[in-house]
Amino acid sequence: MKSYTGSRTIDGIRVLVDGRPLGERYDLRKFTNGGFEWTYEGAEPSQLALALLADHLGDDQKALRLCDRFMREVVANLDNDWEITSKDIDKALAGITDDEAR
C-alpha cells in the first residue's frame, strides 16, 4: 500500500509518495505552471489530483477522467499537512465512480 504525504515547508510545497517526490505529470495535462497546491479548488489542486490518481491507478486515461471530481471532493479538502494511503484513495474513488454510474 502506498502512502502519499503533503506538507508546507520553509522551502515550499512538498508532496511525496512512499518518501519520494511525486511527479507533476505535466505530460498528461498541464493545468498550471505553479506545481501542486491543496485546500481549495483550482488549477494547482487539479495538478495534484491528476498526479495522485495517475500514480495510484496506473491508468492515465482514468486519472484524467476522474481528476476533476477527485480534486473537488478530496484534494480541496486536505489539511495544510496531510497523508493519504492507497486505501483512502480507493475509498474516495468508490464514491466518485458509484455516482458516475447513476
Image (spheres, rainbow, N blue to C red):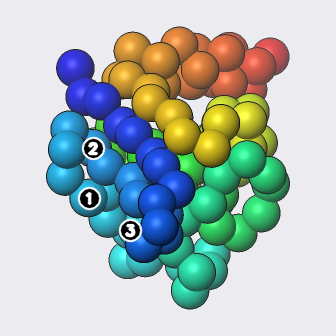
Nearest the viewer among 12 and 53 is: 12
- Secondary element at tag 3: loop
Measured as percent of width and height from the top left, residue 90 is found at 46, 19
Residue 21 is marked as 1
Label placed on residue 17: 2
Q: Are marks 1 and 2 in contact (CB under 8 Å)?
A: yes
**Residue neighbourhood size for the residue with mark 2, other residues' Cα within 10 Å, grouped as few (<14), some (14–19), many (≥20):** some
Q: Is residue 54 left or right of residue 12?
A: left
Q: Earlier in the sequence, mark 3 or mark 2?
A: 2
Tell me the distance, in whole angstroms, between the alpha carbons under discs 1 and 3: 12 Å
* Spatial CA span between label 3 and label 2: 14 Å
Kind of residue at disc 2: Val
Q: Which mark is residue 45?
A: none
Residue 1 lies, with reference to residue 55, above or below; the image says: above
Quadrant in the picture for the N terminus: top left
Residue position marked by numbered label 3 in the rendering: 25
Asked where in the image residue 99 lies, by quadrant, the reply is top right
For badge 1, the amino acid type reads: Pro
Closest to the observer, 65 or 41 = 41
- Name the front one of labels 3 and 2: 2
What residue is drawn where x is 39% and y is 53%? 15
Q: How many numbered marks are there?
A: 3
Q: Residue at x 46, y 60 (%)?
A: 9
Mark 3 is surrounded, within 10 Å at the Cα level, by few (under 14), some (14 to 19) or many (20 or more) other residues, namely some
Say if mark 1 contacts mark 3, CB within 8 Å: no
Q: Amino acid at mark 3?
A: Arg
Question: Around disc 1, counting alpha carbons within 10 Å, would you say few (fewer than 14), some (14 to 19), or many (20 or more)?
Answer: few
Task: Give coordinates of residue 85: x percent, y percent.
Answer: 38, 23
